[in-house]
Image (spheres, rainbow, N blue to C red):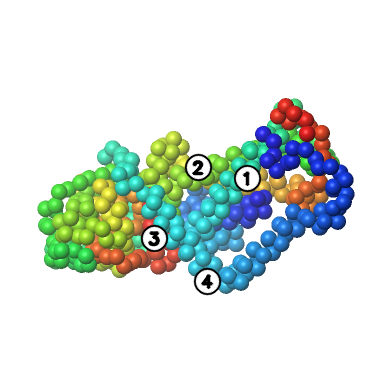
Amino acid sequence: MHWVNVAVMLVMITSGWGIYDDDVIVRGFHFSPFWRLGDWAAWSLNWHFAGMWFLVINGLFYLGYGFATGRFREKLLPIRPAEIVRTVVDTLHLKIAHEDITVYNAVQKLLYIIVILAGIAQVVTGIAIWKPVQFSGLVSLLGGFQTARVLHFAGMTVIVGFLIIHVTLALFVPKTLWAMLTGGPKLKPRTRVEGGHAT
Amino acid sequence: MRSPFRPDSLPDPAILDNHRPLINSLERRGLLRGGLSLGALVMLTGCDVKRPEAVKSALLAISRLNDDVQALLFNPNKLAPTYPASMILRPPKFNAYYDVMNVKPVDGATWRLEVSGLVADKRPWTVQDLQALPQSSMVIRHICVEGWSYIGGWSGPTLRSFLEHVGADLRARYVAFRTADDYPSSIDMATALHPQTLLATAYGGDTLTDPFGYPVRLRMSTKLGYKNPKWITAIEVTNTYPGGFWEAKGFPWFAGL
């Protein structure tokens, strides 16, 4: 699911930049053609509206899996503020503790939660600007069509910001890349208490 | 909640030992790898990604599928939000595939609207004929596919009243338009019958000016800007897909809001 998401996210982001360039939100800020998917806006749009299905279907599987198996709760919670501060300080000293790649640190947890929420928000704001009449209630909830459009753009910048940190740090700890390609280290059968009974 | 894929109890180790070689060869990742290469092979043979035309035809196929999804999402009774007349932008924003300097005005006195296709009465229409139909007004947001939008106030007969007047087959699939600026366009019948689909002859209470489609243009609250042709000269009711100017260049046909 991760690598489908990588492909789909790249399609959605770069085709989105192609659509954006027709009528910029930040004055004077354009994406150069090199970064844009699609010869021009019509094809960027077609890429975007093709990619959306894969994004949503893959995303639903990912969320369904994460919630149903308890993976989200196990991996992403709890987050303690003190831990966040400590991890940030360590990272700034280039002390990246990632010996056990099956356990996320507090900053990782926070970033993963942010990017998952940003992904969901992109779908919601995307629906609002795709169908502003059919979902006019959603549009007014988001503060109007142009606001929804700016939120859709802002969601993109959050995801791109995450990607920059995510990819940089993954390159710092190359063994995570191998784990991501192979499915991660084999966990020893653990004695664990779950749902009230030991397995 | 525990993983549905995790067994409740571990099997007897002796059984595992007896079948160790078999278990070692059974690898989930092997199946995934195999699946991936099979998928890649199918994609490579079915659709050569190195040829841009193949990618484009695949994208167009999905776009046509999206047209159907959009038609399903379209609620014929759902009205677009309307705004107070004080918010109307004057003059409206001009946009076409050419510059405003190249607009060729249409003479309203000699202008005739041709009617063809699945209609009972094919007599051409004059400006006065259109004015004789019941008039509607709406102040709606115009949304361009590029992303910009503005509030505009439009009046004229509904396309529905026009179609009913000429005895059009309202079960036909498409209503197609031809224009003085060579900008063919077409819409689905459901949208044509929507109460906020007007044959607009006025903007903000005044007769349309030349750059904005005088004497008559289409204005729909439920479609993107490029679906609204100006300077209409002919309307046809048909079951044959008529396409349109931007649609021929790759833009989606339904373009519903």
Judging from the image, mark 2 belongs to the subunit labelled A
Residue B253 disc label: 3
Q: Do the residues labelled 3 and 1 touch (CB within 8 Å)?
A: no
Q: Name the residue under label 4.
A: B53
Q: Name the residue under label 2.
A: A124
Indicate the position of residue B173 as horizontal and vertical percent values. Answer: 30, 61
Indicate the position of residue B174 as horizontal and vertical percent values. Answer: 30, 61
Q: Is residue B196 visible?
A: yes
Q: In this view, does A136 lie to the left or right of B237?
A: right
- Residue at 49% across / 46% down in the picture? A126
Q: Nearer the viewer, mark 3 or mark 1?
A: 1
Q: Distance between the residues labelled 3 and 2?
A: 23 Å
Q: Mark 1 points at which residue?
A: A62
Is disc 2 surrounded by few (<14), some (14 to 19) or many (20+) residues within 10 Å?
A: some
**Could you tell which of marks 2 and 1 lies nearer the N-terminus?**
1
**What kind of element bears circle 4?**
helix
Is disc 1 surrounded by few (<14), some (14 to 19) or many (20+) residues within 10 Å?
A: some
Is disc 4 surrounded by few (<14), some (14 to 19) or many (20+) residues within 10 Å?
A: few
With respect to residue A147, does A55 lie above or below?
below
Judging from the image, mark 1 belongs to the subunit labelled A
Residues at discs 4 and 3 both on one chain: yes
**What kind of element bears circle 3?**
loop
Q: Quadrant of the C terminus of chain A?
A: top right
Identify the amino acid type marked 4.
Glu
Identify the amino acid type marked 1.
Tyr
Is disc 3 surrounded by few (<14), some (14 to 19) or many (20+) residues within 10 Å?
A: many
